[in-house]
Structure formats: C-alpha cells, structure tokens
Amino acid sequence: MSQRARSNLFLAVLLLAVAVDRRGDGVCRGAETATGPSAKPLSLHARTRVETKPGSGHFNAVTKALAWDPARTAIIVCDMWNQHWCNDATKRVAEMAPRMNEVLIAARNRGVLIIHCPSNTMKFYEGTEQRERARRAVPIATKVALRKNCNLDVKREGPLPIDDSDGGCECDPPCKQGSPWTRQIETLKIEAPDAITDSAEAVYLMKQRGIENVIVMGVHTNMCVLGRPFAIRQLVDQGFHVVLMRDMTDSMYSSRRPPYASHFTGTDLVVEHIERHWCPTVTSADLLGGHEFRFAEDRRPRAVIAIAEPEYHTDRTLPKFALGELGKDFRVSLVFGSQTDPADLPGLEVLADADVLVVSVRRRPLKSDQMKLLRDFVARGKPVLGIRTACHAFSLRGKKPAPALETWESWDADVFGGNYVGHHGKGDRVKIAVLLGSRPDNPITKAIVPMLNDREPLVGNGSLYRVRPLASSATPLLIGSIPGKDDEPVAWINQRADGGKSFYTSLGHADDFSEPAFRTMLVAAMHWLTGT
C-alpha cells in the first residue's frame, strides 16, 4: 500500500472514530439516518396563535402539519421529579408520568434522542453512561450567548397570564416550600441511548449531533419549562425548532390567585401564552394516537365561543366574561372571525371535540368545511347558546353566497326555535320580566329570580328584537317590552328536533354585560346546557 493510500485510510478511520465518540453511544449517525428508524418522519399537528390583525389583541388557534426527521429531533423532559414540595404537584406528575413514558418509548423507537433533565439531581446519576454522554458534550460558541437562568422576557412576552407569586400550590393549607426531590420519577425509564443533564450541556449535545427540532415536556409550564437553561426560552433563542407537548405538562397555579380560574384553566392560559410568544404546541396523540391526556380532576366541559360580529363588541365582552365567569368550570376556546376573510372562522375545527357552542356571529356565510363542522356538531345533538345576532348568524337574508361558501338560512328556526324578522328602533331601554308561569323549575330562571328587584331590575340596553311566534318546541323564560309595542320573548330554551337543546337571548349589547343578572343568566344557561 502506498504512503498516500495509508494516509487516506488513517484519515477515514480517524473521522469515523470522532463521529462515534461524538454520538457517545457507539452508533454511527450516518448508518442510522440511512436505514434506521429515522426514515419515517414524525407527523405533528403544531398549534400556534395568530392575531386576527396586528394590534387587535385577538388570537385564533391555527394548526399546521409538521414533518420532523427523528434523527434530527430530541425530547427534553423537564423536572419530572420523584417528589415536589407541593403535594398536589407530586400527584399530578405521578398521574401524567405513565402516559409520558409511553411517549418516550414511541419516540425512542423512532430514533429520537431523549434528554432527561431533572434539575439539581445530577449527583444521583454520577457515573452513568447517560450522564457522561451529556457531560462529554463539547462546549461550542453560539450566536446568542447561553443563559444560566432564562427569566421572564417582559419586552417579548409581557407578563404571564396567571399570578404564581405565591408559588402556585393549591393545597389547603399550602405546602411548605423546599427541595425534596432526589431524582427523576422512576416511572420514566432511562434507557441506554438517552442522556441526562440539568444545564446548557443539552444545547451542546444537540448541536453536536445535528439536532434541529426539540419537543419539550414536563413541569412546570409557567416556571421551569420556560425558564430552565435547557428549556423553551433558551432553545428558541438558540435557533432550534421548538414545540411544547401541551398535554404532557402542568402549571404551578392556585385558583386563589388572579385570574381566579381553575388550576387547569391556569395551565391552558400559560400554554396559550407560549403559543403566542414562543413556540407551537402538540399533543401526545401525535405519537401515540387516540386522544390527548387529561388529568382525572379536570372535568371541565369544553366550550367553544365563536365571535364574529362588529356591532355589539362581543369580541371584548365575551372573552372577559369567559375568563371571569366560566374559567372555574369550563375549558374555553375562543374562535374569532377573520378580519381579512369574512367567511372564515380560523380554528373552528376545535368544535369536533367541544361539549357546547356559544355563538355571537352576524350574517356570515362560511367555507364548506367549516359549515360541515357546524352542521355535524348540531346533528350530534350538542348544545348551543346564542347571543343577540346569533339568530341570524349564518343568514344572508336569502341571498346566494359567493362560490364555495354556504349559508344556513334556517339556522334560527332549526337551532333556537326562533323567528327573527327584525328589530324595533333604538330608544327606550327594554324592560325585562321573568315568565314564572312557563318554566318556574328551570335552573336558568331559578338563578336570576333572586337577583331581580325593584331597585335593580334587569333591562336590555339594545333595541328589542321581533321574534314572534316562537316554535312550539321553544319555551320563553324572559319577556321584553318597550312603550307602545307588543312584548317580545328575549330569552328562551329550545328542545331541538335532533335531540339537542339550545338557549338563546336577544340580549347581548355591550352594556348588558355590566348587568349581574345577565351574566348570571348566561352562566346558568351554560350549566343547564351541559348538565353540570
């Protein structure tokens, strides 16, 4: 063999040795990507938040498909400790861990690198091959300086939507804070190809291996999942493509603190914050199939609120009402009408898993696929609540819609048992009376009667709708009157032909939401519709 041939052979062997050493697991990366489990991409449904228009403050959930190469993907498991200082947090970690371990098994079998990051427990893992694999990662220069602590970036994301200043423990009495953890929860199996770290070693290891995509899971979303040196803020800053697995996480939030919503609503709010400001989210169903994970104590019915009307400003009143009045008992998804395409309700596909639909829409034809979602929801006998213009939500007064768009001209009759034919002019406020003789046992009536008296009567601040006659399936609960005109029903329930039930009110003017009895009526209607 010539000297040149021997030199070339030596160089090839040296390069192969370097590649093997960098992998740290004795497997040549090139061989795996060519024929191994990474050949089939990971198919993810990434949800993000898109503002209806700049400065509107209204965001729709928009989902798009991602196809990630498993060999260029890692999973970060954040602080899934064996014990937390908060007892409730410890229980939720234990409840979530079996499903998370299934995710890790499925991802590992596809060739995804699993990096376990139980902070402040590295002593427990000293000498293990997984700990050494991360420790040997060679520090490299990064375009953006690595941070040891990635605290709230007020300029980029503003404040968090929940107040976690008390530590977020919801136990009664609150648990004593401390650091009782010693290792990662044993339910999550650490296998030979994995790595263990609690620092920016994770960044070095992923850069060294050519990892471009990262799935983050673990606890807690409003704290460590955002702020650890291996977590979302750092990874986004370093240029990785990042997603949060939103059903494999939890928050540290107590309903005793603003916004005084349920613990699980608090988690949803932080997830939405991340989708707005940092990265998309996916669910474990993308890897395992079936449905997303939900904690056993999270029994909230899912409410979808569709808002697309310009006159009564329900784009402001309904979100505030939803958070303040429904946040403890309902899992709410807001769907705002597009401000560039009047026939689009972006994100309406969430209706497929909804338990109740709230409609505040005015004269909007819809794209065929969205109208199908709506018709299918009603056909399944699902409950519907309508506010004000909802009676003519999808009607163009009989006019033919543009090509590829659909109306639902009989929506009012089909869903609400109504007969909207117009409204009286603006003028006197509408005087409201309860029709005790029709359904005195209805929980909606029962909820508002104690609130009504001569000093605080319920009034309607918008014009009186003309809706007579109602269908025989409809039962009026409230009647409205103005001087010199016939009385008109302003709130009623309807037992639909498809087996479902609906509630409708022609109230819903912006000033109506300042009326406690009106808000109480809507909350009672939501509970009646969902049987909760």
Image (spheres, rainbow, N blue to C red):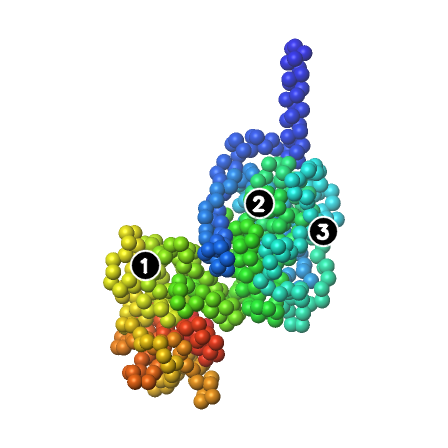
Image point 42% across, 79% down: which residue?
443
Q: CA distance from mark 3 to mark 1?
A: 57 Å
Image point 68% across, 44% down: which residue?
145
The residue beneath circle 3 is 121
Quadrant (top left, top right, bottom left, bottom right) of the C terminus: bottom left
| Residue 303 visible | no
Q: Report which quarter residue 416 is drawn in.
A: bottom left
Q: Is residue 334 left or right of residue 401?
A: right
Q: Is residue 517 left or right of residue 264?
A: left
Secondary structure, mark 2, is strand
- The amino acid at mark 2 is Val
- The amino acid at mark 1 is Pro
Q: Is residue 91 above or below residue 404?
A: below
The residue beneath circle 1 is 365
Q: Report which quarter residue 209 is drawn in.
A: top right
Disc on the earlier residue, 3 or 2: 3
Secondary structure, mark 1, is loop
Q: Residue furthest top?
A: 2
Q: Are marks 3 and 2 in contact (CB under 8 Å)?
A: no
Q: Residue 238: horizontal and vertical position, in percent?
A: 62, 43
- The amino acid at mark 3 is Thr
Disc on the earlier residue, 3 or 1: 3
Secondary structure, mark 3, is loop
